[in-house]
Image: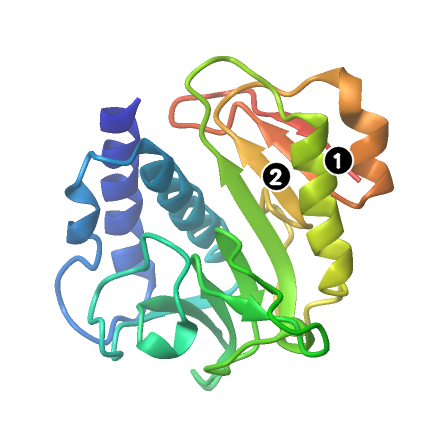
């Protein structure tokens, strides 16, 4: 599975290189070659696949001007640290929203409460709060063909609610994207058991989301 994920990331990187306006030359994904963390590789695979889908209807470019160069965070990190990110741009090329991987988002009124979703759509600010975020996606790599637990759905649903989601996303076209609402995604399957709970807490479930999978599973909202 690791090799399949890495191969898929490299192929998508090549595709994005042809449709995006890059600030520097060369592939920005070389650091992903480490095979020590399958969960991180899966999270990054979901991120790049989402960017690929977004590029069908939006102008996408990568911003790698920051202090970290071409590196994306491998663990929850501070956005202002200068990590690479993707931007959705308007017709003039000015950034409308940031598509971030693994950056911390603070709650504006609850002290010491943060969340770092694997993927988020945010305003173009260095210190995002709940007021600046529009979408959460969390990826769960599972070694066995397991489904999301009740606790996983409830916890993610609570975070969605506590950060005042869902919200409309001005300027972003999510048509034909897999993560068109707040989503839990996994390489494993999903179960009918928690469909009602998932809808109650405004969480879309996506299963069998992996390279070469022709039939992803969905519990939509």
Residue 164 point in image, percent of width and height: 77, 65
Residue 141, position in %: x, y? 45, 30
Write the residue at 55% across / 76% down.
128
Disc marking residue 184: 2
Residue shown at the point (75%, 35%) measured from the top left = 220
Q: Earlier in the sequence, mark 2 or mark 1?
A: 2
Of the two numbered discs 2 and 1 in the rendering, the one whose residue sits closer to the viewer: 2
When the figure is inspected, residue 154 is found, relative to residue 90, above or below; the finding is above
Using the numbered discs, state the Cα–Cα distance from disc 2 to disc 1 in whole angstroms: 11 Å
Outermost top residue: 145
**What residue sits right under mark 1 in the picture?**
220
Q: Quadrant of the N terminus?
A: top left
Residue at (61%, 39%) from the top-left corner?
184
Q: Position of residue 122 (x, y in %)?
A: 56, 71
Seen as rendered, the residue at the extreme front is: 112
Crowdedness near tag 2: few (<14), some (14–19) or many (≥20) residues, C-alpha within 10 Å: many
Report if residue 177 is visible in the image: yes
The total number of labels drawn is 2
How packed mark 1 is, by other alpha carbons closer than 10 Å (few <14, some 14-19, many 20 or more), is: some
- Element at label 2: strand
Residue 202 is left or right of residue 74, and the answer is right
Quarter of the image that includes the C terminus: top right
**Image vertical order of residue 18 relative to residue 3, above or below:** below
Relative to 216, residue 54 above or below:
below
Residue 162: percent from left, percent from top: 75, 60
The image quadrant that residue 6 belongs to is top left
Residue for point 24% across, 62% down: 71
């Amino acid at each position: 599975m690791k090799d399949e994920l890495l191969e898929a990331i490299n192929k998508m990187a090549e595709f994005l290189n042809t449709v995006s306006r890059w600030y520097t030359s060369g592939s920005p994904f070389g650091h992903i070659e480490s095979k020590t963390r399958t969960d991180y590789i899966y999270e990054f695979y979901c991120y790049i696949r989402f960017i690929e889908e977004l590029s069908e209807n939006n102008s996408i470019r990568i911003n790698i001007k920051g202090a970290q160069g071409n590196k994306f965070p491998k663990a929850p990190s501070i956005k202002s640290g200068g990590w690479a990110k993707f931007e959705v741009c308007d017709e003039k090329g000015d950034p409308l929203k940031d598509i971030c991987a693994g950056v911390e988002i603070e709650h504006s009124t609850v002290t010491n409460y943060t969340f770092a979703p694997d993927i988020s759509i945010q305003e173009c600010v260095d210190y995002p709060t709940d007021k600046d975020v529009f979408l959460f996606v969390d990826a769960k790599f599972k070694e066995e063909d397991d489904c999301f637990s009740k606790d996983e759905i409830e916890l993610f649903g609570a975070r969605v609610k506590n950060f005042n989601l869902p919200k409309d996303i001005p300027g972003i076209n999510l048509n034909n994207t897999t993560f068109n609402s707040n989503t839990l995604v996994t390489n494993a399957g999903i179960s009918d058991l928690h469909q009602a709970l998932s809808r109650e807490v405004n969480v879309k479930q996506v299963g069998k989301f992996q390279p070469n999978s022709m039939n992803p599973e969905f519990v939509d909202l």
